[in-house]
Image: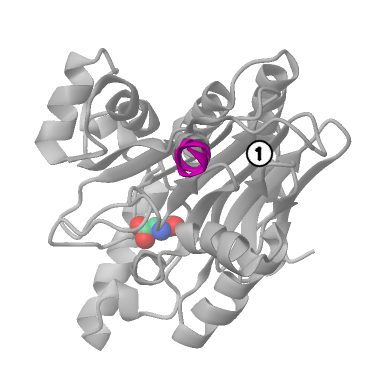
């Protein structure tokens, strides 16, 4: 009898544990809501950004954070906040995502995006898409309207189209600035024989957002054109769940940087794992990955992250990262190492 009661208790405890990922954790929230975003990390310094261009970036980052704020403040979901924030950055030619995406070696724009929801670990991602106006919407469609997590190329485009996501003529993504970068890199490649990823001045520019809403839900998303001069249908970390994007009940993370390193080091998931297994705080865990593990490996980039209490961190090991964050109490928009 005693044994049966014990076994029942054990089963109840076990079933509670199994249920854990499905629960939105609301209690002990430090901030009612929180939002953090990035527009890419890289060789960004005051000396290579004119005051006018700097202002354009700051204005766009402010517009994006305002949009997220209006959604979260009025009780909207982190899923909508992340989607809308990323769409604003994708629609801007300033960032390497959507319009303004970098060019591949063959002179086309191939984009990757992903999104993940912390409460149920549901996620969606697309890779190498060429005609979807807002790749983040395609990633969200994969998450919400399919049983899959990751779709690539023409299959992803077909699914997005069937799901009502807007498609557009690929010429829309072209900007002279990115075209000229490709030409410069092709020239250098001819001179040095090194591919773009080996050249020291590779620049990044992915966009991403992570939000915690008043319901306690954490969502993270990332969108990118990848790296200039990429070839062989190369896909980076941005659409890889656990590498460029991750969200669970502990934290949400979106990365930017040299994707190959972020995939090898499973960077986004590693932040959550270190918090869970080593009991590190959000900022300690993120700092370990970006400023220790990646620096030792030679991987450059940064990440943005928030935890379930609304704590925020934005470490990067490059000279700058376009970034912003917001809670009901605080607001920050920055570019350099300030
Ligand atoms: N992480 C992206 C990639 O490797 C690039 C970036 O963040 O700018 O595709």
Residue 238 within the segment the image draws in magenta: no
Q: Does the rendering let one see residue 44?
A: no
Q: Is mark 1 within 8 Å of ligand 1?
A: no
Q: How many marks?
A: 1
Q: Nearer the viewer, residue 291 or 198?
A: 291
> Who's the residue at 51% across and 50% down the image?
254
> Who's the residue at 81% across and 35% down the image?
31
- Which residues make up the magenta segment? 1-10
Color scheme of the displayed model? one colour
Residue 45 sits in which quadrant?
bottom right
Residue 9 within the segment the image draws in magenta: yes
Left or right position of 63 against 102: right
Quadrant position of ligand 1: bottom left
| Residue position for label 1 | 61
Task: Give the answer, above or below, for where 178 lies relative to 118.
Answer: below
Task: Give the answer, above or below, for where 141 lies relative to 249.
Answer: above
> Who's the residue at 57% across and 42% down the image?
249
> Who's the residue at 25% across and 69% down the image?
186
In the structure shown, which secondary structural element does the residue marked by tag 1 occupy? helix
Q: Nearer the viewer, residue 152 or 241?
A: 241
Residue 58 sits in which quadrant?
top right
Task: Kindly give the residue lying farthest to the right in the view shown.
Answer: 329
Task: Give the answer, above or below, for where 264 lies relative to 143.
Answer: below
How far from the left and from the top, in percent, is residue 177? 41, 50
Left or right position of 241 against 293: left
Left or right position of 59 against 106: right
How far from the left and from the top, in percent, is residue 252? 56, 46
| Predominant secondary structure, magenta span | helix
């Amino acid at each position: 009898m005693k044994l049966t009661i014990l076994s029942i208790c054990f089963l109840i405890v076990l079933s509670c544990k199994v249920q854990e990922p499905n629960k939105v954790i609301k209690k002990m929230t430090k901030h009612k809501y929180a939002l953090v975003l990035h527009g890419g990390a890289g060789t960004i310094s005051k000396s290579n950004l004119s005051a006018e261009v700097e202002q354009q970036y700051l204005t766009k980052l402010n517009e994006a954070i305002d949009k997220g704020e209006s959604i979260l403040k009025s009780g909207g979901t982190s899923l909508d906040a992340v989607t809308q924030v990323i769409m604003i950055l994708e629609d801007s030619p300033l960032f390497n995502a959507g319009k303004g995406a970098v060019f591949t070696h063959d002179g086309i724009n191939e984009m990757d995006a992903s999104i993940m929801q912390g409460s149920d670990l549901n996620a969606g991602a697309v890779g190498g898409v060429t005609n979807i106006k807002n790749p983040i919407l395609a990633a969200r469609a994969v998450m919400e309207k399919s049983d899959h997590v990751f779709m690539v190329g023409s299959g992803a485009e077909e699914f997005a189209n069937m799901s009502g996501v807007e498609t557009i003529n690929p010429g829309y993504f072209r900007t002279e600035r990115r075209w000229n970068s490709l030409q410069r890199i092709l020239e250098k490649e001819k001179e040095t024989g090194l591919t773009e990823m080996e050249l020291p001045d590779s620049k990044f520019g992915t966009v991403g957002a992570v939000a915690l809403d008043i319901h306690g839900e954490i969502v993270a998303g990332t969108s990118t054109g990848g790296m200039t001069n990429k070839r062989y249908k190369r896909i980076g970390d941005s659409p890889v769940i656990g590498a460029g994007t991750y969200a669970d009940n502990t934290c949400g993370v979106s990365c930017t940087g040299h994707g190959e390193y972020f995939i090898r080091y499973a960077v986004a998931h590693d932040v959550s794992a270190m918090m869970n297994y080593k009991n590190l705080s959000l900022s300690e865990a993120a700092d370990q990955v970006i400023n220790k593990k990646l620096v030792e490996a030679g991987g450059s980039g940064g990440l943005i992250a928030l935890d379930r209490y609304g704590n925020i961190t934005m470490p990067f090991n490059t000279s700058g990262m376009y970034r912003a964050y917001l809670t009901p109490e605080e607001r920050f928009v920055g570019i350099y190492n300030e």
